[in-house]
Image: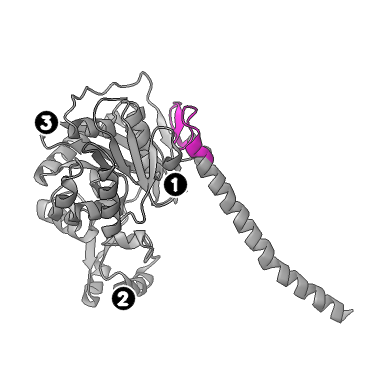
């Protein structure tokens, strides 16, 4: 274990598990916070789990401060959950007395994590983004006819998705369905972005993960490529690989972007190759936290969480050590059929299963098996009354 302070990781889903395992490569003593032991990372042998009541709001702040009172040092704080970022940003002055962390300014967090504000920022600075409109009032619906279908509709405030008040995105089939959907969303989410769909497969989606310290010279990048997503059309990363062939394009662009925003901390940009325009367009940023597939960088020699920890605690950082053979990362074994989408044979690491750390996968796959069993039980119970009614009807006819 390192002689430095411990790391506190907030968010114990697959994202957080990748952070814990990345920190373990540097011998960092790690504590992980979440609201339930049902999260996979809470079972990793590389961390100590701590339960908090909420991952957002005052209860999270109180939980973090209570944890800090039990430690004799100021830990490094790494965020692996979207809702956590807003809370830590809002209470940053109070939390900075207890933890070491880097975040963009409060205004930058608000702008970059809101799809409507980010689109406005992109337009002001001439960033290549999909053609979009921001809808916040009924009169904005007149602009729908200016867009080329297919389109996607996303709530501006992603926290509403976390709170399960709306879906992550919608894909209306035609303009009439789009108008009906948008009228309904005005009543429920208030503001949203309607964006032209960039044609092309999931494998045309790339990402640039990064960390930038208080000193801009302490910056690290990793370029990757999606191969599969779940759900298939526009979901989270299910299978991805390193993409050094595009690093020369994505990383200078990302560096210029974070310089323009005076960005500090963890983040990423997601891109899609627009074949019609022959350019990479920016789909969306990830702000203040690690990405779902963050561990693919570590597996390919670019350990961003460990780099961030060492920067926060004032320890020296070393240059990335690229592996002799690139490796792929998949979120779970459920995607094994999609492995045929890889154009080259390379080792594939399951996000949950590791021989050196088996308990997270056992916890996750046991929970998945329980869900399947529950669904089958509900179907059987739902079918039973129908069968009884058929039997009664048959008896009457005889």
What distance separates the C-alpha of mark 2 from that of mark 3? 46 Å
Q: Which residues are magenta?
A: 341-362
Q: Position of residue 295 (x, y in %)?
A: 35, 35
Q: Position of residue 79 (x, y in %)?
A: 28, 45
- Identify the image quadrant of the N terminus: top left
**Most frequent secondary structure within the magenta stretch:** loop
Residue at the right extreme, as displayed: 398
Rendered image coloring scheme: one colour
> Where 92 falls versus 27 (above or below)?
below
Tally the marks.
3
Query: Of the residues under marks 2 and 3, which one precedes in the sequence?
Result: 2
Q: Which mark is residue 187?
A: 2
> Where 359 falls versus 91 (above or below)?
above
Q: Which mark is residue 39?
A: 1
**Residue 168 falls in image quadrant:** bottom left
Q: Is residue 303 left or right of residue 171?
A: left
Please report contact status of discs 3 and 1: CB closer than 8 Å, yes or no: no
């Amino acid at each position: 274990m390192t002689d430095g302070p411990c790391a506190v990781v907030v968010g114990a889903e697959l994202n957080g598990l990748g952070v814990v395992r990345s920190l373990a490569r540097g011998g960092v003593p790690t504590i992980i916070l979440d609201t339930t032991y049902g999260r996979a990372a809470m079972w990793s042998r590389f961390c100590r789990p701590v339960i908090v009541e909420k991952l957002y709001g005052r209860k999270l702040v109180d939980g973090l401060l209570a944890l800090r009172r039990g430690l004799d040092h100021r830990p490094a704080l790494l965020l692996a959950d979207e809702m956590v970022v807003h809370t830590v940003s809002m209470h940053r002055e109070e939390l900075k007395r207890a933890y070491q962390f880097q975040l963009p300014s409060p205004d930058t967090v608000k702008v970059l994590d809101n799809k409507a504000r980010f689109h406005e920022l992109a337009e002001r600075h001439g960033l290549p983004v999909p053609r979009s409109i921001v809808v916040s009032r009924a009169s904005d619906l007149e602009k729908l006819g200016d867009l080329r279908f297919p389109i996607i509709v996303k709530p501006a405030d992603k926290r509403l998705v976390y709170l399960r008040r709306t879906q992550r995105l919608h894909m209306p089939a035609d303009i009439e369905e789009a108008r009906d959907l948008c009228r309904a969303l005005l009543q429920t989410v208030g503001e949203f972005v309607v964006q032209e769909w960039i044609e092309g497969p999931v494998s045309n989606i790339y990402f640039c993960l990064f960390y930038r310290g208080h000193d801009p010279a302490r910056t690290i990048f990793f370029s990757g490529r999606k191969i599969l997503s779940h759900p298939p059309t526009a979901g989270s990363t299910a299978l991805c690989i390193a993409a050094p062939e595009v690093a020369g394009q994505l990383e200078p662009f990302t560096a210029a972007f974070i310089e323009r925003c005076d960005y500090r901390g963890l983040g990423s940009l997601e891109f899609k190759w627009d074949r019609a325009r022959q350019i990479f367009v920016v789909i969306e940023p990830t702000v203040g936290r690690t990405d779902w597939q963050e561990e693919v960088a570590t597996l390919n020699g670019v350990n961003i969480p460990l780099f961030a920890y060492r920067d926060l605690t004032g320890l020296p950082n070393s240059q990335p050590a690229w592996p002799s053979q690139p490796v792929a990362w998949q979120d779970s074994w459920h995607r094994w059929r999609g492995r045929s989408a890889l154009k080259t044979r390379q080792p594939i690491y399951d996000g949950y299963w590791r021989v050196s750390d088996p308990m997270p996968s056992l916890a996750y796959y046991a929970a998945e098996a329980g869900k399947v069993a529950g669904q089958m039980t509900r179907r059987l119970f739902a079918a039973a009354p129908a069968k009884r009614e058929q039997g009664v009807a048959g008896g009457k006819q005889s």
